[in-house]
Image (spheres, rainbow, N blue to C red):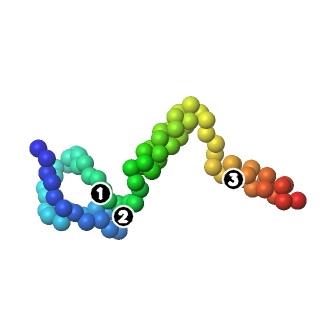
Amino acid sequence: MAHHGAGTGGGGGAHRDDPMNLTGGTEVDAGVADADDICVDERVALHAALDRALDDSEAGRMLDAWAFLEAHRARRRQSSR
C-alpha cells in the first residue's frame, strides 16, 4: 500500500504537510524533485564519477585527503622557490 502526500523541507529535516500514522520500523521512500540545476548529461557524468570513485575505493586505490593536500602544498612550495 502506497501513501502519497505533500511535504516541506527546512532546518535539515522534512516535514509532512498532512498527518500520517506510521508504526515503528516503517520505511518511507522519499525523493527531491527539481532540487538542482543539473541537466541529464551532467547527472549521468556525476553518477559515472561516483561509480569510479567507489570502484577505486573498493580496489584500495585511495589516498587520505589530508595527506594528499599536505603533499600537494609541499610540491607547490618547492616549485615556487
Quarter placement of the N terminus: top left
Provide the residue designation for mark 3: 69
Provide the residue designation for mark 2: 12
x, y (%) of residue 22?
A: 16, 52
x, y (%) of residue 71?
A: 74, 50
Label 1 and label 3: CA atoms lie apart by 35 Å
Foreground disc of the pair 2, 1: 1
Residue at point 16%, 49% (across, down): 23
Quarter placement of the C terminus: bottom right
Tell me the kind of residue under disc 1.
Answer: Ala
Provide the residue designation for mark 1: 33
Which residue is more in the foreground, 41 or 1?
41
Q: Quadrant of residue 35?
A: bottom left
Residue at point 55%, 37% (across, down): 57
Foreground disc of the pair 3, 2: 3
Q: Is residue 50 visible?
A: no
Q: For this view, does 79 lie left or right of residue 29?
A: right
Which residue is more in the foreground, 36 or 59?
36
| SS assignment at label 2 | loop
| SS assignment at label 1 | loop
Residue at point 40%, 60% (across, down): 37
Label 2 and label 1: CA atoms lie apart by 17 Å
| SS assignment at label 3 | helix
Question: For mark 3, does the 10 Å Cα neighbourhood hold few (<14), some (14 to 19), or many (20 or more) residues?
Answer: few
